[in-house]
Image (cartoon, rainbow, N blue to C red):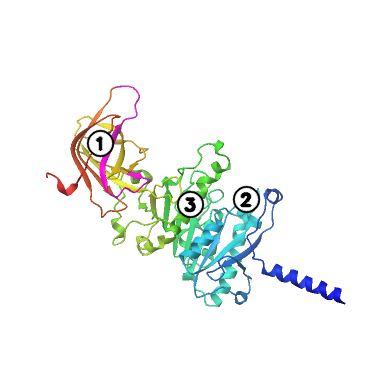
Amino acid sequence: MLKLCFFICLIYWVKSDEEKKCPEFTDLNIGNALSGTELRVQLLLYTTDNPDCSERLIEHNVTASEYLNTAKKTVFVIHGFRPTGSPPAWLGDMKELLLSSDDINLIIVDWNRGATTVNYLTAVENCRKVAEILKNYVDQMLVHGASLDSIHMIGVSLGAHVAGFVGQKYNGKLGRITGLDPAGPSFTHEPPEGRLDRTDAQFVDVIHSDTDALGFKKPLGTIDFYANGGTDQPGCPKTVFGGIQYFKCDHQRAVFLFLSSLKRKCDIITYPCNSYLDYKRGKCVDCNAFQPMSCPVLGYHADRWKKWLIANNSPTKAYFDTSDQDPFCMYNYLLDITTWNKSIRRGFIRVKITDYAGNTAESEMNSEASTFQQYKRVRILTGFYQDIEKISKISLTFSTKTLIGPKHKLRILQMTLKSLNNPERLQLCRYDFVLMENTELTFKPIPCSEKGT
């Protein structure tokens, strides 16, 4: 009898211990991908009351949740294709940063069983099935007091289209969808109802980072942000010798840029423009249409520009450059030059700035050559990885990048350097000087208002 009692107590203790275990994101492996997986979706809820231990939600029983508060904003995070079966590397940071930024219901949509396969088309087919499951749960939330206005879906790659399919089911009344480099393969030639579209939510913001491979190239949202033009990202491998990172680094960069916006170490400022080339030529740096607000910032807080973007009544493309590592911010300046040379010159200008403590920052050489003509103003967008607040010296180098032939010189009548990140700072000027090709010229600038003193 004593043994039986002990055995029953042991079973109860083991069962209770299992019940206390936190539900976790499904962890699979390459073997699962090779054999294929049947779709199975679990919704893992995190809140400020249970930030470290998720609660598995029951699809048809919202009231069974201990932590879900339908009066609060709800954010769904939806991953994409998982060819190796492992949990997304960014998932932990996404959870912690979202919970630290807002008092929300955070629901991680785990469809790893269904996304883990070597057959990409199988995962694509499962997208609509996942959307149907999410729609069923949102329906239950709405019955118990939730509002479509307060629902924000963040979709990565295939997950962006899943979010779009959910939004379609509510006729675009979801509050917001954020697409992080929405998948291109199998979706590029689909009509709006077959992919994410700007009509799928009240506000749709999209970050593009791999438009020449795994991502979607054309605009999909209310505003589409193109990082470094949307293709090759700084810091990512350029050849297959970079291993697996060569294939996924550019595609994943959209996620890490979004995460950077949650850390708030610096704002990534973007510039609405028709093309990346026009942006690089300094044609789109004023953002007058967004007054009294400044240029849109990337990421979680992009919806602050929602009113102006929706009023625009057409898709907005915004371009920006980044550094090669977190937090990815660039400190942009507009270099405005008027030249005297009678002969047309084509070339590049490298800029270096120095503060009074001797700290320096050097710009990247622009990929497009500028054309300098007599008495014509040329605007060049240039960026630095460091923020030099009080500039004591400016160094300029002119180059045509030609290896043969005579060296050229560029006579500059006026140069202006203006901070775009901090427009309240003084514009700096210099007048009437000559740049010899491939020879750095360093000088002390003066505030533009002091001309002639």
x, y percentage for residue 35?
72, 50
Query: Tag 1 or tag 2, which sits nearer the N-term?
Result: 2
Residue to which mark 1 is pinned? 442
| Residue annotated with mark 3 | 254
Q: In the image, which residues are magenta?
A: 382-405
Q: Name the secondary structure under disc 2.
A: helix
Q: Residues within 10 Å of mark 1 (few under 14, many from 20)?
A: some
Q: Are marks 2 and 3 in contact (CB under 8 Å)?
A: no
x and y percentages locating residue 445 in the rendered image: 21, 42
Picture disc at residue 75:
none
Q: Is residue 65 above or below residue 227?
A: below
Residue hosting label 2: 121
- Quadrant of the rendered image containing residue 382: top left
Q: Is residue 215 visible?
A: no
Amino acid beneath label 3: Ala
Q: Identify the amino acid type marked 1.
A: Thr
Q: Nearer the viewer, mark 2 or mark 3?
A: 3
Q: Earlier in the sequence, mark 2 or mark 3?
A: 2
Name the N-terminal-most of marks 1 and 3: 3
Answer few, some or many: residues within 10 Å of disc 2's Cα (few below 14, many 20 plus, some between 14 and 19).
few
Residue at left 65%, top 58%? 26
Q: Observer-nearest residue: 31 or 98?
A: 98
Please tell me whether mark 3 sits on a helix, a strand or a loop. helix
Closest to the observer, 205 or 262? 262
User: Is 245 drawn above or below residue 261 in the view shown?
Assistant: above
In front of the other: 155 or 14: 14
**Magenta segment: does it hold 399?**
yes
Q: Residue at horizontal 69%, vertical 69%?
A: 19
